[in-house]
Image (cartoon, helix red, strand yellow):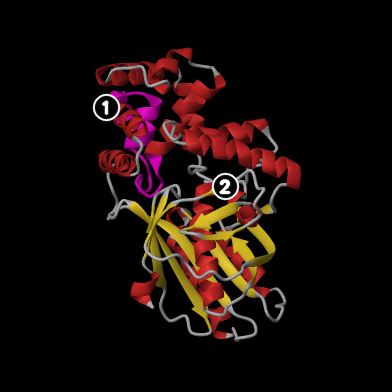
Amino acid sequence: MTATPREAFANQVDYCRANGAPLTAAIVKAVWEGLAADSALGHMIHDWPRDPLHDVVPLRVAAGVQALHLSGAAPVLAPLYAGELRREEVGPLIAEVLRAHEDAILPWMKGPPQTNEAGRASGLMAGLKWLAGQGLGPRSELIEIGSSAGINLMLDRFLIDLGGVTQGPVDSPVKLAPKWKGPPPPDAPVEIVSAMGCDRDPLDLGQAEDRLRLAAYVWPEMKERTARLHAVFDLAEATGAPGVVHADAADFVEVQLARQREDGVCRVLMHSLVWQYLTEATQARIGAAMEAAGAAATPAQPLAWISLEGDRTLLRHVLKVRCWPGGETAATLAHGHAHGGWFDWLAEEVG
């Protein structure tokens, strides 16, 4: 069932509150309440042609507002992002900004949120650790869809602590240590032999405009995320930007799966907070391609599918893995925070 715009904004408020982002929740709530129905932005949101919840319309507006603050285009927003406003002052301020800066906000509605969050690499690495523990690996070849700027393709350059099980260079400037509940994933080595991703509108970590776009989607109360993003910028500048190509997700998967295989390497499709943006036709093509490739997988040339996607009912992310040979069902490995702040490991429950 398609959500109404009102339901999409209400759900986003709940999602933000459940994931430790009260300021973002207040901004989203104020946007909905301050949206002028007869404005261009109001018409666009109220007449949204698809599911505004799946398209995460509220965060598109919130990012446009924060970009005005980060760029200095709306100095009036400074007290809001500094946490200096009383609750009753937020609504009138946001309404004023929507009226005064509508032309600058409208372009943010054209594409999906670029929440290319490095913290989600913890979940993806946990999935790779689990696969290695099942005997698939330790060498892995990553193909990612919806890569945005490719930050999660850099996961082997991060130092990641998963409940005491670590992976990555100890001197990495990007250190991830989510709060961990339950046993850690297998302490099995993971080696990434290659990593390639695609996006229909890829961003470049070396471009100031694209860095601003990424920063605008970071929930402002999460200072650790902002610091981590800037550490990623520095790491990419020092070690090279990840490989992301402009391509349709289904086309990319089909081409990548058709490439010649190497014995002893697990080919892994992975994605995080991407699936909801794909059309049903694209989802079906990817699923069919993976099923066909899975049917041809062997112990020497295994295949896996790692997904870390949001659940709007649970208000959290869910980490799932399928692997072939076998692969009839997906194993739910963990529930997690929207940006990798914590994980609740469930793998023992699913074998």
Local crowd size for mark 2, using a 10 Å CA cut-off: few (<14), some (14–19), many (≥20): many
**Number of the front mark, 2 or 1:** 2
One can see residue 217 in this view: no
One can see residue 278 in this view: yes
Please give left or right for residue 86 compared with residue 237 in the image: left
Please give left or right for residue 252 compared with residue 178 in the image: right
Q: What residue does disc 2 label?
A: 175
Q: Which mark is residue 163?
A: none
Q: Which residues are magenta?
A: 31-57
Membership of 38 in magenta stretch = yes
Element under label 2? strand
Q: What residue does disc 1 label?
A: 33
Q: Nearer the viewer, residue 150 or 170?
A: 170
Amino acid at circle 2 = Lys
x and y percentages locating residue 210 in the rendered image: 62, 36
Task: Identify whether 158 is placed above or below 233.
Answer: below
Membership of 61 in magenta stretch = no
Q: Earlier in the sequence, mark 2 or mark 1?
A: 1
Q: Nearer the viewer, residue 54 or 228?
A: 228
Please give left or right for residue 72 compared with residue 13 in the image: right
Q: Nearer the viewer, residue 255 or 41?
A: 255
